[in-house]
Image (cartoon, rainbow, N blue to C red):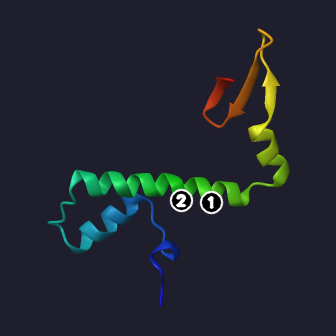
Amino acid sequence: DHHLSSLFFVFRDAFAYVQERRFCINPNAGFVHQLQEYEAIYLAKLTIQMMSPLQIERSLSVHSGPTGKDFCHFEEGWGER
């Protein structure tokens, strides 16, 4: 007995897998968008689970920028605080 979350496929691989077995699949755009959002959230959670506490602290640490303003560093880049 498997749960859906234990059978994780990236969207592209899951789509190809199903389409190989049933060529006529055509999921609507809203459903595809929801799957892609879930995939991003799921992968982010996995990444955090695999990070050490020090790596998490570093990714959330506050740095002082060249203008003296506080900047927070996140995975996407720098953002003014």
Q: What amino acid is labelled 1 in the image?
A: Leu
Mark 1: few/some/many CA within 10 Å (<14, 14-19, 20+): few
Residue 43 vs 67, above or below: the answer is below
Query: What secondary structure is marked by label 2?
Result: helix
Front residue of 36/63: it is 63
Question: Which residue sits furthest bottom?
Answer: 1
Residue 9 vs 41, above or below: the answer is below
Query: What secondary structure is marked by label 1?
Result: helix
Q: Which mark is residue 17?
A: none
Which residue is identified by label 2?
A: 42
Question: Which residue sits furthest right?
Answer: 54
Residue 68 vs 11, above or below: the answer is above
x, y percentage for residue 46?
A: 62, 60
Rendered residue at 52%/76% (across/down):
6
Taking the image as shown, residue 55 lies to the left or right of residue 80, namely right
Rendered residue at 46%/57% (across/down):
39
Q: What amino acid is labelled 2 in the image?
A: Tyr
x, y percentage for residue 66?
A: 78, 11
Taking the image as shown, residue 68 lies to the left or right of residue 43, namely right
x, y percentage for residue 33?
A: 33, 51
Rendered residue at 67%/35% (across/down):
74
Taking the image as shown, residue 74 lies to the left or right of residue 63, namely left
Residue 17 vs 70, above or below: the answer is below
Front residue of 19/5: it is 5
In which quadrant is the C terminus drawn?
top right
Question: Which residue sits furthest left?
Answer: 24
Which residue is identified by label 1?
A: 46
- Label 1 with label 2: CB-CB less than 8 Å: yes
Q: CA distance from mark 1 to mark 2?
A: 6 Å
Mark 2: few/some/many CA within 10 Å (<14, 14-19, 20+): few
Taking the image as shown, residue 43 lies to the left or right of residue 67, namely left
The picture quadrant where one finds residue 23 is bottom left
